[in-house]
Amino acid sequence: MSHDFNVDEVFEMAEQVERNGAKFYRDAALNIDDEGAKKLLNEFAEMEDEHEKTFAALRSELKDGDKQRTVFDPEGESALYLRALADTRVFFKKEIDTTSLKEILKAALTAEKDSIVFYLGMKDLVPEKLGKDKIDHIIREEMGHIKLIGGKLKAFKV
C-alpha cells in the first residue's frame, strides 16, 4: 500500500530533524573540553534552531491545498509515524567519540547527507498538487549545512 505525503507533513518532519540536530550539537558540546570546539558546536545548534524556525515559518505560509490529507486519519497516527520517522532517519543515536571535534563533525556531515537523501526520497512521495516543489527549499538548506561542516572538516585534512 502506497502513502502519499503532503509538503506540510514533510515540513513537520524537517522541523523535527532540526530539533534533533540542535540536540545532537548541544549534547556534543557538553562532552568536549576544547572551548573553541564547544563554541562552534553551540553555534551549529543555534543554526539548527534557526532552520527549525525557517521551516515553521514556511509551513505556516502553506496554502490549504499543500496541507490536504492523503489518507483518513482521525486519530492523528500519521503525525506520530512521521515524527518517529524523522527521529530515526537522521540525527539518531550513533556511537561516536564526542570528545573529538573531528569525529563529531564527521558524524554531523554524514547526518546532513542522510537528511538530503531522506528528503529526496520524501519528495518522490509528495504529489505535485501537494507542494512537491517546496521540498527543494529544505534540501538547499541541508546542502548549506554540508558546505559549512565540510569547510570545518577541511581544517583537519580528513
Image (cartoon, rainbow, N blue to C red):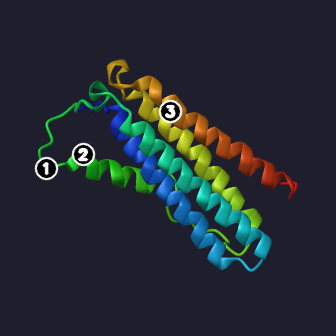
Q: Nearer the viewer, mark 1 or mark 3?
A: 1
Q: x%, y% of residue 123?
A: 44, 29
* Mark toward the start of the polypeptide (2 vs 3): 2
- Disc marking residue 75: 1
The amino acid beneath tag 2 is Ser
Question: Where is mark 3, residue-wise?
Answer: 120
- Disc marking residue 22: none
**19, above or below 137, in the image:** below
Which quarter of the picture shows residue 84?
Answer: bottom left
Instruction: Report the side of 18 relative to 131 (left or right).
Output: right
> What element does badge 3 sit on?
helix
Q: x%, y% of residue 155?
A: 87, 56
**65, above or below 115, in the image:** above
**59, above or below 100, in the image:** above
Which quarter of the picture shows residue 38?
Answer: bottom right
Residue at image position (18%, 34%) is: 71
The amino acid beneath tag 3 is Leu
Residue at image position (56%, 35%) is: 139
Decide which of 133, 114 is in the foreground and name it.
133
Q: x%, y% of residue 134?
A: 46, 28
Residue at image position (47%, 43%) is: 55
The amino acid beneath tag 1 is Glu
Q: x%, y% of residue 28?
A: 63, 71
Residue at image position (80%, 48%) is: 151
Question: Where is mark 2, residue-wise?
Answer: 78
**Quadrant of the image containing the N terminus:** top left
Decide which of 17, 2 is in the foreground and name it.
17
Classify mark 1: residues with Cα within 10 Å, few (<14), some (14-19) or many (20+).
few
Classify mark 2: residues with Cα within 10 Å, few (<14), some (14-19) or many (20+).
some
